[in-house]
Image: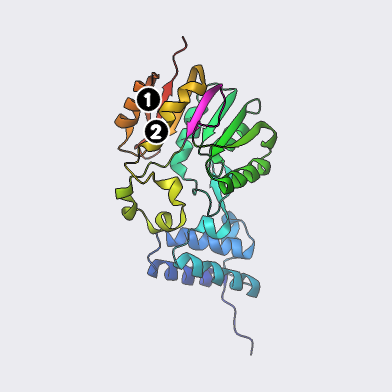
Amino acid sequence: MTPRRPSVAEALRDLTAELRAAGIDGPERDARHLLAVAAGWPRDRLTLYMQDPLADPALEVLAIMSEQRMAGRPVSRILGTRAFFGREFEVGDAVLDPRPETETLVIEALGGPFKRLLDLGTGSGCIAVSLLAERPQARGVATDISAPALRVAARNAQRHGVQDRLAFVRSDWCAAVEGGFDLILSNPPYIAQSEMAGLAREVREHDPAIALTDGADGLNAYRAIAAGAPRVLLPGGRLLVEIGPTQARAVGALFRAAGLDDIACHPDMDGRDRVIAARKPAT
């Protein structure tokens, strides 16, 4: 006798329980996401199929993905994509997994005009690609010290149709970059080495360490940006960086000492300090 296949509702219930028992945060959300992908359905249509039996190929794929998730691998790295600012981006072991709080950086950038942007430490390219997709007349340069990261970013630029307006440069921050830009952005590694052990397992074990920490106090990237950005930033141009929630005062002081003004701190959706904005004096 052929074994009875579980319904979608049963598979969802069982996977949710397994993920919860494995200590996974948000097991219901992750179970729905993985099940929908395994079955080839949009997540928002999953409820339409709850009483249907889950096909054998979907069960096999789901078993492989659930095993990875219970081992602590993030859903985005299992699937190879992550949603950011309304678009899907390729992610992989070479790049930081884009976070929702980083969208604050994009929102603040879109609050003012720009024609030519520079994204320092681009990783997946989600910041630069999102901004160019929103501003079809703008152009940009994206840098990273990692060649594999630049390849991921280039594929994401191609994916979203901005490849002709975004150049990629392998550079240690501003070292290999020529000016001038009216907008410079960065989400640099800002976790202090002493804080790494306290990060969530999904972050600590799967995001590249070079994208998380400077191996020191978490401020070295801002020191490098403060030293190099004024050279390539046009008069009146803006500098926006993501920060950790306790770094606003220190980063603001670095930018002020570099001759930048109009320094302001902007919170993320949870009210935590998230973006430091500064401007190069117009004269």
Residue at image position (46%, 27%) is: 228
Please report contact status of discs 2 and 1: CB closer than 8 Å, yes or no: yes
User: Seen in the image, is 193 located left or right of residue 13?
Assistant: left
Where is residue 25? Give x, y as percent: 39, 59
Q: Secondary structure at mark 1?
A: helix
Q: Is residue 275 visible?
A: no
On whether residue 178 falls in the magenta region, the answer is yes
What amino acid type should be assigned to the residue bearing mark 1? Answer: Phe
Say what amino acid the circle numbered 2 marks: Tyr
How are the colours assigned in the image? rainbow
In x, y percent, where is residue 276? Answer: 39, 29
Lower sequence index among marks 2 and 1: 2
Q: Magenta part of the protein: which range? A: 173-186
Image quarter hosting the N terminus: bottom right
SS of the residue under disc 2: helix
Task: Say which residue label 2 marks.
Answer: 222
- What residue lies at 60% left-to-right and 57% top-to-bottom? 45
- Which residue is denoted by mark 1 in the rendering? 255
Nearer to the camera, 238 or 66 = 238
Residue under the point 54% across and 62% down: 34
